[in-house]
Image: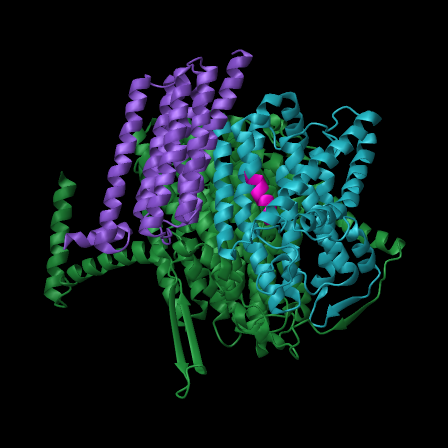
Chain colours: A green, B purple, C cyan
Amino acid sequence: MLTLLTVMITAYVAGALGALLFGGGAAGRGVAALGAAVGSGTGLALGLTAVASGEVLVQAPARLLPLTGLMLRIDGLSAFFLIIIGSIGAAVALYGFGYAASYEGRYSLRSLGAMLNTLLLSLSVQVAADNALTFLIAWEGMSLSAYWLVLTEHDAAETVRAGVWYIAMTHAGFAALTAMFLLLADGDLTTSFDGMRANGATLSSSLRNMVFVLALFGFGTKAGIVPLHVWLPMAHPVAPSHVSALMSGVVIKMGIYGLSRVVLDLLGGGPTWWGGLVLGAGAVSALLGVLYALMEHDLKKLLAYHSVENIGIILIGVGAGMVFQSYGLASLAMLGYIGGLYHTINHAVFKALLFLGAGSVLHATRTRNMEKMGGLIKRMPATAFCFLIGSAAISGLPPLNGFASEWIVFQSLLGGFNIPKPEAAVMMPIAVGMLALTSGLAAACFVKAFGITFLALPRSREAENAREAPLSMRAGMGLLALACIGLGLAPFIVVPALGRVIAGLGRLPDVQTQFTSGLSLASPNGFGRMSPTLIAVGVPLLAILTPLVMLALGVNWKWRTGESWGCGRLGQTARMEYTATAFAEPLRRVFAELYRPTKELTIDFHPESKYFVQSIEYRSEITPWFEKYLYAPCLWLVRLLAAVVRRLQSGSLNAYLVYVTLALVILLLTARM
Amino acid sequence: MNDHDTLFAQLSTLSASAVLLCGIALLWRRSLSAYIKAFRWQSLTLSVAFALIGYFGHDHDLYIIAVVLFALKVLLIPWYLNRLQTRVGAEREAQPYVNVATSLIVAGLLVMLAYAITRPLVMVSKLPTRGGIPLAVGLVFVGLFVIVSRRNALTQIVGFLVLENGVALLAALCTYGIPMIVELGVFLDVLMGFLVMQIIVYHIRDTFDSIDVEQLSQLKH
Amino acid sequence: MTGYLLEIGQALLALLLAPGLTGFIRWIKARLQGRRGAPPWQPYYDLRKLFGKEVIVSKHASWIFHFVPYGVFAATVAVTMLIPLIAAPLPFDAVGDLLAVVYLMLLATFFQALGGLDTGTAFGGMGASREMTIAAIAEPTIALAIFGLAVGAGSTNLGRIVAGTLANPGAVINPGHLLGFAALFIVMLAETGRMPVDNPSTHLELTMIHEAMILEYSGRYLALIEWAAALKLMIFFSLLSNLFLPWGVVTTLTPGALGVAVIALILKVTVLALAVSVLETRLAKLRLFRVPELLGVSFVLALLSVTSSYLLR
């Protein structure tokens, strides 16, 4: 395992250096992709070995970097996230090789390749970190490299704005995390996580609460919990698509990793309200995420909002686990955590797949606006097929992976009646309702996303002339599509493995014996049973049998093509199609109280008669309420403070020297005390 | 628990939920006559509930109350409400402050709240009727919510009457009816309150030509 | 082995009965409205005719269009194999529980909507958009009704729910049970496109939902889709009757009991069909934007059902 770790780190470093060295061109792209792919592949192998063997690897890379206090330790949870990073990283690296080609000569490929490798490296180091210092350095490395990557297309105003939001939010989170670790580590950031475990148990309950709230805020900004998610739908769409895939698939999952590491592992669970808060935040994020996604017609922005939704689903699982844990219902708690983590890897896979698909579409049509797409299924069949698989998976449709994990989350919520306190038990049915609404809306949203983008007639010249993505891009998507199917079919492998991972933290007893490990999956205490594997065999079997039976019965097998039926109008053009806006209109009206859309209708009548209209303009906009009511006041406050601070900036050198002297004196005075 | 009690428990909870459902049906309807109809059905189920509790609880006073209730709330008040409606003109509850779908969900949450609040009471209670108590409290909440969220004076009156039905149901479920004299006094109170309210409705209409209570804010100036 | 045979047998039974059910509702409705109406077995003739006709495919359609009828039909037939129609528990009980059933039906709806969008006509898009809206808003009610049933029976597996209710008959007049039934009944009306949500016999452009989605289909494709729609109605009817009123469902296998079970199923479904026909005759179709409010009602019913069976344990 140690060799694998070394190879992984070396490959990433080599990839980054190679990209800097070789610069643009196929060689640079190739080296960067190779480094990332080898690194990810090794990381994946490392994770798989660690999960399978249950070994824990502890390593202080002192020889490599003396005097830094870096500590690495790979246990089950780290290994699980290494698997996520590795599998997505490998597909992204492969895809990136082809995708980055279109950047040649326009943007710096040097920094793109180097930063991609750095991002992957810091992600891997972060999940393997064994003390706060290592964790925070990797965290910052991840944030900064991601920032750099977001700014790849730095000449667009939208990108710059997104970058600013991202870096501001991420640093607010970073501050919270530093404070949290200082509290937990008793002021010394090099304390190992083992030390923190011991510390965590001795902290007073108010301090523990503070640690939890800081952790939730810090990791929440990264994960994109509503209302801390504002940066996410801005930053993810403007990054290069394979980077978006990595960010939505993996980077935001670090919030989940951190939260589970700190709350479940270091603190060992807490009072019920912790879990209740996480569960509530999850349910709200899930619902609001999908509702705003429905109103988006920018394909990548839509996907970004769906990341908010899925983080919500993950947190519903984790939150339910925390609630059950606080009541000592170990097997149900386990089920909740397993559901959350299972959905983490599932979301990583299908969201990365969808972003790569969107990237291929963007690559072919040069637009992210769905209203300009259409008919791509005939022009890019492979991309369309992969996107369809991703869409079905994210909508939680059987037998794909989204269904398996949502089923487990549902099962854990259904166990809620075991909770003795009604105040807490009441949350569960409400969460069930919200989760169900979320998955229904997600299905509606992906009918829109797939149907408008890929089906019917092309709505623009670009869409009409679209060409299929190159081989490396298709290969990247294909890998992830296979992973979607595989993860969906094999919950009987994934679930017990996750059970071992969580039990390995020593906070919950392993209940894997209570999961039947046959083809069908049963929740502990036998509340429900189902088998996506058999469904996956059955439904296609029926779909194949049906035409065979029909043939045997002598059904008329002829078909011919003709015009679509159109009430007698001649010819069909793309302007007659339903648009994305129209598709989402019923839901916009149903949830009008939430969206509060603004409407503006200008009609120019013909001067002679108002029965003839010369032009008509309709404009409707939706501003998310949290931007209006939460962030606008915050920004106003910051501006106000900045105006106050500005008075200090006189521009005179002497004044600055006075500040320095004053600061020195105050520092000396306080240090003396 | 013997069979008699089990059946009693089932039936009392069932009738209590029927009464509550009539209250919730109110939120889904818009026209005033639908409100009155829902109220009438609710009062009918309520008097059936009273009779049931009287039969199973061996308290024959409750039969009398059920009959009075029927006369008052199924016949008299709805008839009067209908007359009132024709006199002041049927205004639809066109734009409640809270829209229908949200109202319904709020009502559901209010009932859940009622369950949470009455939990300790239900837990210690040995009455076979205890299953209906949260529903009755929920109905009180729903009545209050109708009053708060509707803007037509007449619908607000119906809301008040629904609330009162909730209180009566609660009394019947908790104590198998408070002494009859008190109960009858309460009915008289309701009738008086109702009469006063209808006079006010006339006044509102005479002053503003509408019974939208929004108009009342004009009195400030 | 008998279990598997029974499984296939009941799926075939459902397939066989489903068109008759649709025809029966149409016939009763016609009678109630003072028309003579087509005989109840008319849908069988329709299916035969459609299977014999040539398919016309829009020139803008992709492979999705060709795949959808098979996908929808297969998913719906798969559901009939998972639900207890005449016997419980069956061997496929461990393949899918109630949640799997709901998601399989969502799978069918998903593909159906894609099929509607594929040809690029405005009608298809309109139908797809409306269908998905209603499906999405009906989802929480279904989930909560499942919750109520599952908490009552201690399992989400259909066989266990049926067996649980059979063992404890007093639970049937439990308010939680009745409210759950009412909630699922409303959802059934919405999901299967009956009045007052959708008018199954209209082809008026502005009001149709399901019909708009399948407007481009013809021949054997249309036959499959129509059959799947009838089957979906059959599934909902049998779920409603067997989950809430499970008498007649066989738990120990004897030929005589099976015969009784089939008759009981037909009887229960007939009663429900009568209720739906009366409703459809009495009710006007709701405006599209009142449908969410109706589903709101069903959601509240389901919420109350859960609360009463959940917090009063």
Rendering quarter of residue B194: top left
Q: In terms of secondary structure, what is the magenta stretch mainly?
A: helix
Numbered range of the magenta stretch: C183-190
* Residue A196 can be seen, yes or no: no
Q: Position of residue A514 (x, y in %)?
A: 62, 27
Question: Horizontal placement of A461 versus A204: left or right?
Answer: right
Q: Nearer the viewer, residue A235 or A623?
A: A623
Q: Out of B212 and C45, give the one closest to the viewer.
A: B212
Does residue A407 show up magenta in the picture?
no
Q: For the image shown, how many numbered marks are present on the structure? A: 0
- Residue A263 falls in which quadrant of the image? top left
Counting from the top left corner in percent of width and height, residue A280 is at 41, 41
Return the residue found at the far bottom.
A608
Q: Residue at x 57, y 53 (%)?
A: A443
* Place of residue A446 in the rendered image (x, y in percent of width and height, measured from the top left): 57, 57
Of the pair C28 and A649, the residue shown nearer to us: C28
